[in-house]
């Protein structure tokens, strides 16, 4: 899993990077083998909050063989925005993997049903 960080309108500090790595590692470790790339976009939105600029965190997660998943959170506190976005990313990935698993089970059941129906039809042919 590789992580790409993009920033807009503010500098990336070592403290922010360390917090991001800590939160992403904690949230995404169980899915590490299924994730190919995580892109994180930081943006400062001018004038969107009462106390000054609001920070926006957007995470684009590319799971192997699936469409990218996107998670976003904005807050006055960048560290809080990172934490919440990482938690959301974990939930979104779990949901996507559950859907994929359900789809695979249905597909397997249908293939088994089709195979059994074909075999039952063939049993009556030789009589």
Image (cartoon, rainbow, N blue to C red):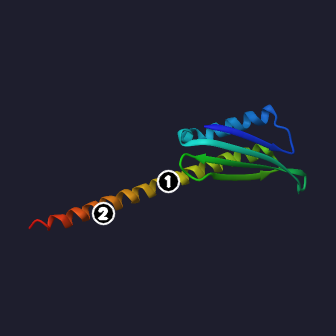
> Residue 89, position in %: x, y?
63, 49
Residue position for label 1: 98
Picture residue at 75% right of the left edge, 35% below the top:
17
> Residue 95, position in %: x, y?
55, 54
Q: For mark 1, give the secondary structure.
A: helix
In the image, is 43 to the left or to the right of 30?
right
Q: Quadrant of the C terminus?
A: bottom left
Q: Quadrant of the N terminus?
A: top right
Picture residue at 50% right of the left edge, 53% below the top:
98
Relative height, residue 116 to residue 76 (above, below): below
Residue position for label 2: 114
Picture residue at 62% right of the left edge, 51% below the top:
68
> Residue 106, position in %: x, y?
40, 60
Picture residue at 72% right of the left edge, 38% below the top:
20
Crowding around mark 1 (Cα neighbors within 10 Å: few <14, some 14 to 19, many 20+) is few
In the image, is 43 to the left or to the right of 120?
right
Q: For mark 2, give the secondary structure.
A: helix
Q: Which residue, as the protein is rendered here, is positioned at the far top?
A: 14
Along the polypeptide, which appears first: circle 2 or circle 1? Answer: 1
Q: CA distance from mark 2 to mark 1?
A: 24 Å
């Amino acid at each position: 899993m590789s992580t790409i960080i993009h920033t807009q309108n503010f500098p990336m500090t070592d403290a922010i990077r360390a917090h991001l790595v800590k939160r992403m590692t904690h949230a995404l470790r169980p899915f590490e083998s299924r994730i190919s790339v995580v892109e994180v976009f930081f943006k400062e939105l001018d004038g969107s909050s009462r106390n000054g600029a609001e920070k926006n965190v957007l995470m684009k997660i590319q799971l192997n063989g699936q469409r990218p998943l996107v998670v976003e959170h904005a807050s006055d506190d960048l560290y809080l925005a990172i934490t919440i976005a990482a938690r959301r990313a974990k939930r979104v990935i779990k949901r996507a993997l559950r859907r994929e698993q359900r789809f695979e089970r249905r597909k397997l059941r249908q293939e088994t049903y089709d195979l059994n129906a074909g075999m039952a039809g063939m049993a009556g042919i030789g009589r």
